Every structure is written in C-alpha cells, then in structure tokens.
C-alpha cells in the first residue's frame, strides 16, 4: 500500500457538526496546524446531511442554562453529568448566533428575536446547515481538510495519544496522521440492530447509517474509559420513513393516540424514553397502530409541514404525496426505531471531564461520541466542539512537542499491515462475506439484546447468549477480504460495530434494573433500584471489558481528570 | 436503491460522487454516475441538490410505501424547486425560498 504521512498539531477525527465547529474555533489559533479528517466529504457528512428541523437546544426567553440542564437530567432519570450539561448549556445561545453568522436562516419575531417553538427550541431553515458548517471549517487558513479517509485506530503509547491511522476509501492509500492532540468527533453508532426496514430500505433509519461507532471502537481499543452505553437511544418516528415526529408533535401540537383515538402519552409519562415505551406497550396490548393525531389541522398547516419536511426529511413529504393523503386528511402513524448508541441524545460515550478530555492524555471528545451529556442536539454538539478545541489548544500550550515513543511507529506498521491483509488475493468462493456477518450481528442484537422484535426487552440470560454470539462473529472479520478500498471500509465498519456491541452488552448486563423504559427495559429487573443511581463505566483491559460503577457527579460538583 | 440516475442527462461531472455522505456513488466504465451499494442510500438527497443537470431522482422503496412516485429538485442560490412525478405522469411542484425559515 502507498503510505501518506501527515503531521499536524491538532487532528480532528470526523468533520461533522462538532468536528467542523472545533475546526472553526481553532481558526483563532493561527500558530497551530489543524487537520480535519473525514471518511466522506464534509459538505454533507455526519448527522445533518439532509438538514435539521429546528434548533432544539436553546435557552429561551426568561429561562436559564440550569433550566436546560435540569430538563436533560430529568429526561435521563438522573444518570447524566450536571457539570457537562451546564458547561454545554451556557454556550448554546452563542452557538446558535454563530450559526446565524455563518448564514443559517432563523425565523424572527416582530422585535427581531428568534421565534421560539416550545420551551427549548427556535425555528430555522436547516436545509443547508451542514454545507454552512463545512464552509466555516474550510475558511480557516490553518485548517486542512482531508476527505475520504477512514480512520480506524488511534496511535497511543503510555496512555497518551500521538495521532491515528486510516485508509483512503477511494485512493486505497494508508494514512498515518501524526498529531500532538486529537479531538474525536465521529458521532455515535447506527446499524448495530436489525433496522425497521431490514430489506431494500435498510438504511432509511433515524441516525446516520454511516456513523458506525468508529470513535467509540478506537477509544475502547486504546483503553479509554466509556460510560452509559446501556442508555440506548430509540427514536419515536413516523412509520416507514423514520422521519422526525417532533416537528408535528410540537409544531402542530399533535398528541399520541392509539387505534381507538385515545390519548395515551399521559398514561406513560412524557420523558423521551416513556413516549417510546407507551407506544410499544399500546401495541403489545393490541391497541395499535399508534398515531400522532393530525387530522383536521387544515390545508395551510399541511402545506407548512410539506415544506418543513422537504427541508430535513424529504421522504416524509414524498410519502404524503405518494399516498395522496397528507396529515390534514390522515393521522400520522408512528413507531420506535431500532436502538442506537448515541451520546447526543442519551449519555453513551467517552467518559470525559468538564474540559471534554478523555482518560487518554491528549485525546478529547465532542458531540455524539462524548458521553454524560444527553440532549445535545446541534447546538450542544457545537458547544462541545468549541470546548474540546479550546482544551486541545490549552493542552498543546502546556505540553511542548517532544519525542514520539518508538512503539508508536511499530503500532502504525501493524495497523497498516492489517489493511493490506484484508486486501490480499481473494481465495475462490469465500463462504463468508461482510454483509452476512453484519446481518448476523443485527439479528443477534435484535433477538437477544432488546431489539424491535422483543419490544426492546431483555434479561440476563438473553444477554449472555448475545455476548456469546457476538464474540463468535469477531474472528470472522479477520478473514474477510476486500477487492476495493470501498469494500475495506465495510469490513472496518463491521469491526467497529462488533466492538461497540460487545461493550454495549456488558453495560446492559451490568445495570440490573430498569432505569429507562424501552431504552433499557429488563424483564428480570423491571424496576429502578437505588443502588444503580450511579454511572456504569467500562474499560477494555487485556481483552476483557472491566465494568466499574462510578458515583454521580452532582450539582455544584465538577469532574476534572487531574493527571492531565 | 432510493435514487435513480438518468444516464442520458448525467454528464459524468462527479458532483454527486463528491457529496454523498456514504461514498456510495462512483463513475462507471462509461463515465456515468452509478450507485455501488444501492441498499445503503440514506435518502438525504444531497446528490439531487448537487446535480446541475437534474439527472437524479429520489423514490421510496416499496417496503416503505413507495408506489412509483419520484422526487426531483432544481436548486439555485435562492430556492429549491421540488417536483413530485406520480406513476401516472401527474406532477406537483413545491418551491421553497431558501431565505425563509420553517413555520414549524
């Protein structure tokens, strides 16, 4: 393989929402060379490809950052980090204003203030939000953007990061990215479970299907501590298109109703997890399908919804037009998605301190890959990108460039040799191909680790089976062969997902309670238990996942990794 | 696949290939855009907006309610004109001014 070596001061892995904003922030540090690496082109990569419906994390008039942090803490039933939520919330509105500076259109009221929707949201036209963020990153003279390079592994020695390795998904070259500090911003993990539409439309899912948990997996292998993987996220979505429901629920004040037209949401609670749980339970009790009650909203409201969805999820408008019946004529059917691991909505991800430093020196995390701070949405991811950028710069100021341990070069050699091994000559009629292993993984997770087919429910015995099966799949990956770099990408995405699945199962097994309905619904421990008012954290040690329960970081407390 | 590419309109400029967040599009042997993994399209429509020749249309798989209607878009700096073309040939266009925000 051709080898390309890039030297930089700060390496940002993932040019999505958080990564682009981290690059924009580091533009102020002209003395630092910054490299953003993404496996696709940053114009539409990450979660925001189609657009976004609203700014969903905003401190509305008369409210405070504490209001937002309290909301997120309650929605997570107490298992979130108040220190992270407050430091994020304090920056939300400035990040929204930065988006407007970059050209995003906001709806304004008569006084020129942002038009609010509910208590935490403001209205925008979010269709072009990602191209605007990409432009902001590219505009910085000290920022280099390296696209179509899939990063697979961090280079770590003595618990300090020295860069990362990847391969070009078009050019097939090996990339050794040497850096003095690294910000991981790769997003969360989709595609672990069998999806709602498992056939032709398998990628019509809520979360970005190209977010495959790479950032989690590389951190896990590097020995970084992870938190709260068991707090899975399941989105309540429009059936089939898996388009957002919030726009209808909040914009048109539509209630969740069962087939008999009864409003059921109040019977189960209004937390994010409870809205999903209620829908599952109504279906289990034979009272489905469930809907958002939109009938009679009027032609003008329907037209507004057609437009709003074209700006973020065009499939839904297409579905309405295709059916010849829009939301004014027919209630919108809803369903839960397959589970995801995503730290922007729940709290799964790297165990970071208030500066977004991970437990590996020089490695910072932002956005969906960073744990402890749910309900980030776009502005929260921007806030974390900004904090991580500031912290990475401060780290470099405090740690002048020094010698790189020889072990790092050996590590890079081994990683690159791994790519080359997969690209070796294909033996005739290989019995196992990447897609088969991926389907096997999704089936195991669905049936034994609380997927759609079990109503998201699971018990200890099922998790043991899931662990056994997932472990048996991992060795198959080493034998998979790729004819092209694009096929190599699929192999590494599968490897990442299997790593995330293993850690997810270990976390789910460790939390012996039902803290969040649907998100972590245990049939053997159906209630919340006081001894689990703690974070479930993990670290890979000598090939084993070691679980540790950590005390809650309460209000007024602040976690700092003091040895950094 | 949830996009279809009109080979007569495609000029092989590669704009769709460059913008796809899943690296799914590539030029085939004849220099026309082609999806190399049809089932892996997320449906973000980035390629539709990037194509200056109107060569790409979006459709729903039958497993999610698709019954033959396609969606295409003509984009300028100031607007997206989205056109729905039904299987029977009937069309409907919704023009969105990019400088206006959602009412929802």
Image: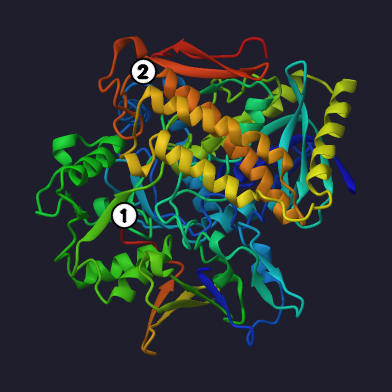
- Can residue A185 be seen here? no
Q: Is residue A428 above or below residue A316?
A: above
Q: Residue at x 89, y 48 (%)?
A: A1
Identify the residue shown where x is 31% and y is 70%.
A320
Chain label for disc 2: A
What is the C-alpha distance between the residues marked 2 and 1? 35 Å
* Mark 2 or mark 1, earlier in chain: 1
- The answer to whether A375 is drawn above or below residue A357 in the figure is below
- Residue A456, horizontal then vertical, whole percent: 34, 37
Judge whether A450 appears above or below A14 on screen: above
Q: Residue at x 47, y 45 (%)?
A: A96
> Comparing marks 2 and 1, which lies closer to the viewer?
2
Mark drawn on residue A512: 2
| Image: A531 above or below A364 | above
Where the C terminus of chain A falls, by quadrant?
top right
- How many other residues sit within 10 Å of disc 1, few (<14), some (14-19) or many (≥20)? many
Q: Is residue A279 left or right of residue A180?
A: left
Image position, residue B64 (x, y; %): 38, 64
Q: Nearest the camera: B17 or A232?
A: A232
Secondary element at tag 1: helix
Q: Secondary structure at mark 2?
A: loop
Q: Residue at x 78, y 32 (%)?
A: A163
Q: Position of residue A553 (x, y in %)?
A: 43, 14
- The answer to whether tags 2 and 1 share a subunit is yes
Q: Which mark is residue A496?
A: none
Is A310 in front, or is A262?
A: A262
Q: Nearer the viewer, residue A125 or A176?
A: A176
Marks 2/1 in contact by CB < 8 Å: the verdict is: no
- Determine crowd level at label 2: few under 14, some 14-19, many 20+ residues with C-alpha closer than 10 A: many
The residue that mark 1 highlights is: A247
């Amino acid at each position: 393989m051709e080898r390309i070596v890039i030297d930089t001061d700060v390496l940002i892995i993932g040019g999505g929402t958080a990564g682009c904003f981290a690059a924009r922030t580091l533009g102020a540090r002209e003395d630092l060379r910054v490299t953003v690496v993404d496996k696709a082109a940053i114009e539409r990569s990450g979660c925001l490809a189609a657009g976004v419906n609203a700014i969903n994390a905003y401190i509305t008039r008369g409210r405070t950052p504490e209001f937002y942090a309290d909301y997120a803490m309650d929605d997570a039933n107490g298992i979130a980090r108040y220190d992270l939520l407050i430091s994020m919330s304090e920056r939300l509105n400035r990040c929204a204003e930065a988006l407007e500076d970059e050209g995003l259109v906001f709806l304004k009221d008569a006084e020129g203030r942002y038009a609010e929707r509910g208590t935490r949201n403001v209205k925008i036209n979010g269709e072009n939000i990602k191209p605007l963020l990409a432009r902001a990153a590219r505009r910085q003279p000290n920022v280099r953007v390296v696209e179509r390079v899939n990063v697979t592994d961090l280079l770590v020695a003595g618990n300090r990061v020295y860069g990362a390795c990847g391969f070009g998904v078009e050019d097939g070259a090996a990339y050794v990215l040497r850096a003095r500090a690294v910000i991981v911003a790769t997003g969360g993990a989709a595609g672990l479970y069998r999806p709602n539409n498992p056939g032709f439309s398998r990628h019509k899912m809520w979360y970005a299907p190209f977010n495959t948990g790479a950032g989690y997996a590389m951190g896990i292998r590097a020995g970084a501590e992870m938190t709260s993987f068991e707090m899975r996220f399941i989105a309540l979505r429009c059936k089939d298109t898996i388009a957002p429901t919030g726009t209808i629920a909040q914009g048109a004040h539509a209630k969740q109703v069962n087939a008999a037209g009864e409003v059921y949401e109040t019977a189960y609670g209004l937390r994010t997890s409870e809205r999903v749980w209620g829908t599952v339970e109504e279906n289990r009790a034979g009272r489905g399908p469930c809907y958002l009650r939109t009938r009679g909203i009027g032609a003008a409201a329907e037209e507004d919804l057609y437009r709003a969805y074209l700006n973020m999820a065009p499939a839904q408008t297409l579905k309405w037009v295709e059916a010849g019946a829009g939301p004014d004529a027919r209630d919108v059917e809803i369903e839960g998605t397959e589970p995801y691991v995503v730290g922007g909505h729940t709290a799964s991800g790297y165990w970071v301190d208030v500066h977004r430093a991970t437990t590996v020196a020089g490695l910072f995390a932002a956005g969906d890959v960073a744990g402890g701070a749910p309900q980030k949405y776009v502005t929260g991811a921007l806030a974390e990108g900004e904090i991580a950028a500031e912290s990475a710069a401060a780290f470099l100021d405090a740690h002048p460039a020094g010698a790189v341990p020889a072990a790092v070069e050996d590590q890079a050699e081994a990683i690159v040799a791994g790519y080359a091994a997969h690209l070796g000559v294909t033996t005739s009629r290989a019995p196992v191909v990447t897609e088969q292993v991926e389907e096997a993984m999704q089936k195991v997770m669905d049936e034994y680790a609380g997927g759609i087919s079990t109503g998201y429910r699971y018990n200890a015995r099922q998790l043991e089976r899931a662990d056994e099966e997932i472990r048996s799949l991992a060795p198959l990956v080493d034998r998979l062969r790729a004819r092209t770099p694009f096929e190599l990408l699929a192999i590494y995405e599968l490897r990442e997902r299997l790593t995330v699945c293993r850690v997810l199962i270990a976390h789910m097994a460790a939390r012996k309670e039902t803290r969040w309905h649907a998100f972590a619904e245990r049939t053997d421990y159906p209630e919340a238990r006081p001894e689990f008012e703690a974070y479930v954290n993990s670290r890979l040690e000598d090939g084993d996942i070691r679980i540790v329960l950590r005390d809650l970081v309460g209000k007024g407390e602040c976690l700092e990794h003091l040895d950094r | 696949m949830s996009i279809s590419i009109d080979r007569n309109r495609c000029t092989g400029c590669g704009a769709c290939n460059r913008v796809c967040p899943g690296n799914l599009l590539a030029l085939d042997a004849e220099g026309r855009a082609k999806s190399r993994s049809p089932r892996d399209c997320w449906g973000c429509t980035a390629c539709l907006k990037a194509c200056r020749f109107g060569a790409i249309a979006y459709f729903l798989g039958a497993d999610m309610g698709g019954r033959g209607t396609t969606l295409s878009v003509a984009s300028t700096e100031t607007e997206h004109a989205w056109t729905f073309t039904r299987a029977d040939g009937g069309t409907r266009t919704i023009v969105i001014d990019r400088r206006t925000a959602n009412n929802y």
